[in-house]
Image: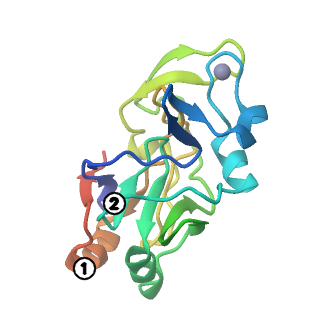
Amino acid sequence: MKYYWLTPKDQRRNNWILHCETAFGVSLRTKYADLQCTKCRKVDELAAIERGIDADVSIYSKSDFLTSDDGFVAVSKRFRDSLASHNVSNISFVSIPASDNYFIMLPNAFAAIVSDNVGMEFHRKCATCGRFRETCFFPVLESFVVNPDPLALNVPDVNQENTRGRQFWFCGSNELVSVLKPQKLKGLEFTEAY
Ligand SMILES: [Zn+2]
C-alpha cells in the first residue's frame, strides 16, 4: 500500500492559533505563557490546545485544508464532514471560537516510532527543554507503525519542528487518497511518503 502526506498549498494570509500578530511582531498569547520554554520559546502545543483557544482566534482562508503558521492543521467544516461521511478514523477536531467554519485537526493517537533511524535531520537541541530548533525531512514510512485501518490518518510520534514549534503532518493510504481526491477539497495536495 502506498502512503501520502497531506500537504497544504501556500496561503495568502497568515493564520495563528496560539500566537498573535502585534505591532511588535508575533507573540505567544498570554494564557500559554507558563507553558513556554524560557530558552527556545517553544510551547507545549498539545497542552496549550487542551487549555483552550482564545475567543478571538479565527482563520482567514478560502481553503478546505491549511496549516496555521504555528503548525496546526486547520480544516473546513466541509473537509471535516467529508472525512466523517467516509469513516476516516484516528482524528479529532477542536473548534475555533471565532471561525465556526474551521476546526483544528489532531490525531487521537500518534503512530509509534519503531526505528532509531527515522530519516530526519535534527538541528540545534534546546538545552532547557530538549526540543530541536528545526528538523528536516519527513519520517520514513518504515520508522513508524501505520494504523491497520486503511482509512485512518497517521501522525508519527516524533516532533517535526520549525523555529516556531511542532508541525502536525498527517499521512494516509492510497485508499484514503482515492476517497478524498474526487471531492476537490481546496488547498489540499498529496505528496507520496517513502
Ligand atoms: Zn526549549
Which residue is at 57% across, 68% downward? Answer: 93
Real-space CA distance between mark 1 and mark 2, rounded to the nearest whole angstrom = 18 Å
- Quadrant in which ligand 1 is drawn: top right
The answer to whether 127 is drawn above or below residue 144 in the figure is above
Label located before the other in sequence (1 or 2): 2
Q: Amino acid at mark 1?
A: Gln
Q: Is residue 173 left or right of residue 90?
A: left
Q: Is residue 179 left or right of residue 115?
A: left
Colouring of the image: rainbow
Write down the residue under mark 2.
Answer: 61
Q: Residue furthest right?
A: 34
Write down the residue under mark 1.
Answer: 183
Location of the N terminus by quadrant is bottom left
Residue 114 in view here:
no
Tell me where residue 190 appears, x and y as whole percent.
Answer: 25, 57
Q: In which quadrant of the rendered view does residue 43 lie?
A: top right
Residue in the foreground of this view, choosing between 70 and 86: 70
Residue in the foreground of this view, choosing between 98 and 113: 98
Which residue is at 27% across, 71% downward? Answer: 185
